[in-house]
Image: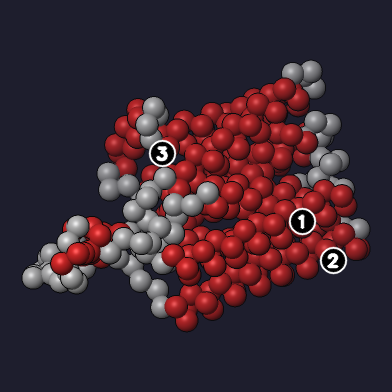
Amino acid sequence: MHPALSIILFTTLSGAGLGLGLWFGVASYGANNAGTVIGAGTAILLSSIGLVCSVFHLRRPLRAWRALSQWRSSWLSREGILAPTALFLLFVQAGALWLESPFAPWLGLTAALLCLAAILATSMIYAQIRAVAAWCTPLTPFLFIAFAAAAGAFLACAVPGVPVFGSKGFAVAAIALNIAAWILQYSWWRRLDRVGTGTSTPETATGLGQMGQVRLLEPPHTGTNYLLDEMGYVVARRHAAKLRLIALILGCGFAILLLAVGIAVGHVPAFAIFAALLQLAGTGIARWLFFAQARHAVTLYY
């Protein structure tokens, strides 16, 4: 699939923002006013940037509102409803924390659940597509949730004024989450190397396999088209292997090392900022490969 920058930014930044919103909703009670503004504001800003980027991936962005009308059957519509609703509740929770309202914890828990549901909906946009064998696996939702939770935890460690986020225990938990996310990513890559484009072939697609090998009499098109542009992207295996290694080094190795140094010296927030940036960089590369290495079954005809 064509790894469009808009969709990579959407899945990476929106996931990180919703992940931070998840942690902020659960563990922000007792935050001071500065921590409330920074935590909720960062979550809302990152998620909003990601959602805006997703609109630019559409052929006709002005009609994006129509995607929200199919919530009964479309995971894209569900994600488009759940994410803004979660961000709105985070905003309301931040106001409740500022005013020291007793309803703040309940608002936070509801916002956290909506953030989790929005991440799941985003992952299901891809996991439900049976024609893309790389995505159609239960690992895909777990992968999105794990990376969102890990990125959110790294960002949370950088938020001052929230007692839980500044603790060494939470930083250790963030490291453990990040390790788990990258183990899932490695498992996802191993599966991708095994299944490739899936079990579909021109013979099975046409039902003529019993007659021998199916060959096209003429090419489907004489020039480029939407299917080739969006679904026929190919990345060399050697380049993919290098990018996987770079993603692991940045998003897992260096990010964890920086946060571990912060734990050791007792200045978690200062080191967590740079650790979170490295984690996001590694996630962005992995997400580029998520699209670049996924091939739609329609490419069998080309």
Identify which residue is drawn at 91% across, 63% down.
265
Q: Amino acid at mark 2?
A: Val
Q: Which mark is residue 176?
A: 1
Badge 1: how crowded within 10 Å, few (<14), some, or many (20+)? few
Q: Amino acid at mark 3?
A: Leu
Q: Nearer the viewer, residue 5 or 211?
A: 211
Tell me which label, 2 or 1, sits earlier in the chain: 1
Quadrant (top left, top right, bottom left, bottom right) of the C terminus? bottom left
Is residue 297 at least partly visible in the picture?
yes
Q: Nearer the viewer, mark 2 or mark 1?
A: 1
Q: Position of residue 208 (x, y in %)?
A: 17, 61
Badge 2: how crowded within 10 Å, few (<14), some, or many (20+)? some
Q: Position of residue 276 (x, y in %)?
A: 69, 58
Q: Which mark is residue 76?
A: 3
Quadrant (top left, top right, bottom left, bottom right) of the N terminus? bottom left
Identify which residue is drawn at 60% across, 37% down.
116
Instruction: State the SS at label 2.
Output: helix
Answer above or below: position of 219 versus 14.
below
Q: On the picture, is 149 further left or further right than 165?
A: left
